């Protein structure tokens, strides 16, 4: 059986990749909704990442956490405005942030993605 990462571990993992400017809460929920592996909840007084632990058999929770963390950074630091729909939640800027976080995690040795690691780490 797989060990489920704790919320504390996942938050520490994310902050080792990039230290965001706005505090957030991260919780791990012991569920597997049909359509979501995680969710980012934003309001003026709440910044919460929720990770659903029962998806661990399909995708590492670290990868799900990076995805939701990208939403947090997009929303709080890079001007994403989901409420006004100026940009889709999975628009171009979001994917650029997500890609940068994944590359940094691989570069720092925090995440192992054998599909892209050789491209990221290749010396020129």
Image (cartoon, grey):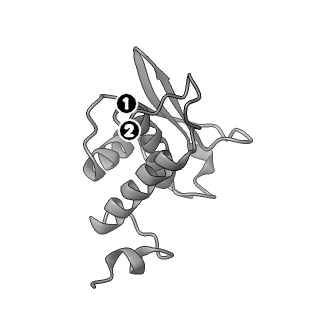
Is 105 left, or right, of 116 in this rendering? left
Q: Quadrant of the N terminus?
A: bottom right
Q: Secondary structure at mark 2?
A: helix
Mark number displayed over residue 27: none
Q: Which residue ends up furthest to the bottom in the rendered image?
A: 124
Instruction: Work out whether residue 9 can be spotted.
Output: yes
Name which residue lies at 37% across and 63% down: 103
Image quadrant where residue 12 sits: top left
C-alpha gap between disc 2 and disc 1: 5 Å
Name which residue lies at 65% across and 41% down: 36
Q: Where does residue 8 sit, x and y in percent of width and height?
A: 34, 39
Q: Give neighbour class at mark 2: few <14, some 14-19, many 20+ (Cα, 10 Å).
A: many
Q: Where does residue 82 sit, x and y in percent of width and height?
A: 54, 28
Name which residue lies at 41% across and 69% down: 112
Residue that carries the numbered disc 1 in the rendered image: 76
Q: Observer-nearest residue: 88 or 115?
A: 88
Q: Where does residue 54 sit, x and y in percent of width and height?
A: 62, 46
Q: Observer-nearest residue: 112 or 31?
A: 112
Say if mark 2 contacts mark 1, CB within 8 Å: yes
Q: Quadrant of the C terminus?
A: bottom left
Q: Secondary structure at mark 1?
A: helix
Is 86 left, or right, of 9 in this rendering? right
Residue that carries the numbered disc 2 in the rendered image: 73
Q: Observer-nearest residue: 51 or 40?
A: 40
Name which residue lies at 47% across and 76% down: 114
Instruction: Work out whether residue 4 can be spotted.
Output: no
Q: Observer-nearest residue: 83 or 44?
A: 83
Q: Which residue ends up furthest to the front in the rendered image?
A: 86
Image quadrant where residue 88 sits: top right
Residue 92, placed above or below residue 52 = below
Q: Where does residue 74 sit, x and y in percent of width and height?
A: 42, 38
Q: Which residue ends up furthest to the top in the rendered image?
A: 45
């Amino acid at each position: 059986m797989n060990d489920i990462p704790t919320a504390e571990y996942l938050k520490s993992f994310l902050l080792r990749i990039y230290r965001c400017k706005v505090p957030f809460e991260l919780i791990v929920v012991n569920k597997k909704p049909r359509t979501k592996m995680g969710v980012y909840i934003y309001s003026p007084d709440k910044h919460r990442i929720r990770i659903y632990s029962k998806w661990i058999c399909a995708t590492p929770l670290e990868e799900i956490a990076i995805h939701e963390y990208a939403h947090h950074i997009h929303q709080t630091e890079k001007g994403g405005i989901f409420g006004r729909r100026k940009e889709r939640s999975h628009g171009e800027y979001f994917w650029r942030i997500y890609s940068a976080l994944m590359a940094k995690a691989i570069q720092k040795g925090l995440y192992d993605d054998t599909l892209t690691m050789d491209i990221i780490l290749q010396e020129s």
